[in-house]
Image (spheres, helix red, strand yellow):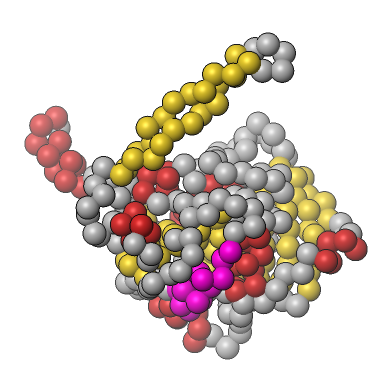
Amino acid sequence: MIFLPFPLISFHYSLPILQHLTLFPHLFSLFLPATKVNVMDEKKRPVILITNDDGAFSKGIKTLMNVASKFGDVVVFAPDKVQSGTSNAISTKTPILSSKLYSQDGVTVYSSSGTPTDCVKLAFYSLFRDVKPDLLLSGINHGSNTSVNTIYSGTMGAALEGCINHVPSIAFSLCDYSWNADFSNAIPFIEKIIDFVLRDSLSFGTCLNVNFPKGEVKGIKVCRQANAYWDEEFDLRKGKYGFNEYWLVGNFVNREPLSRDTDMWAIDNGYASVVPIKIDMSDMDSIKYLKTKIE
């Protein structure tokens, strides 16, 4: 057992102004092989946990809450600020603060000072200790999480944490970094994917990474992660007090632009990409080979 050297601090408050952050009702549906319970066979409404890495007040998470409430009761547990690029990071040196913002019309919203993965862990610990939610949704992210971005993404980190805990999990992203991005074209496909997963579930150890192109969405392509990388540079600037500051910049490079079975091809050609992601990163072929060489 690992003991974390920090307290979990929780306090609850309600402010009238927060009531104006109306959390609307609608969300979810998808596809993939699975061997699990059919949640939609249950008479009770499914419970759907939502988080993200853009913060509890982003347009993307509000859109997802709106969609999700069509399918079940929604609990939001999201960062209180932007946590992009935090991957699976957890807080071990500072306490995690959490606040219940409001609860109305089947939607309950909490914010947390932690990372997206912290949010999922704390939600499981404090709200779902006995019974896990039926579905975890992360997003909708403002920006692409295709290819190798999967390993940097806080949006994906939250979905992977749900997957580790045997909760069917989906990460949604739109390839538009604007704070006021238009998610309307993605909504019918989000609903389709959510509906599928609630009815058929997902295999244990597998979650879905879903990306949408900006603008029109022609359909869905189930595909693999493209072989791509960041060609990175650091922009040297002088800071406020004269110290050197290094700002990470660079270009994203697709090593296989002609391959038609990748997420980047799907996005570049106007399709939503759906990539099944596994928790187990073992390279089975290398295991077989290395056994013959070094055991």
Q: Is 77 a magenta residue?
A: no
Q: Which residues are magenta?
A: 182-195
Q: Nearer the viewer, residue 182 or 284?
A: 182
Q: Is 187 a magenta residue?
A: yes
Quadrant for residue 62, please give it.
bottom right
Provide residue 131's location: percent of width, then percent of height.
59, 68
Q: Is residue 251 left or right of residue 13?
A: left
Provide residue 164's location: percent of width, then percent of height.
46, 55
Q: Residue furthest right?
A: 16
Question: What residue is at 63 percent from the left and 67 percent from the top?
Answer: 63
How many numbered badges does the structure rendering display?
0
Q: Is residue 148 above or below residue 73?
A: above
Q: Is residue 235 above or below residue 58?
A: above
Q: Residue furthest left?
A: 292
Provide residue 55's location: percent of width, then percent of height.
66, 51
Question: What residue is at 72 percent from the left and 49 percent from the top?
Answer: 80
Q: Nearer the viewer, residue 92 or 216?
A: 216
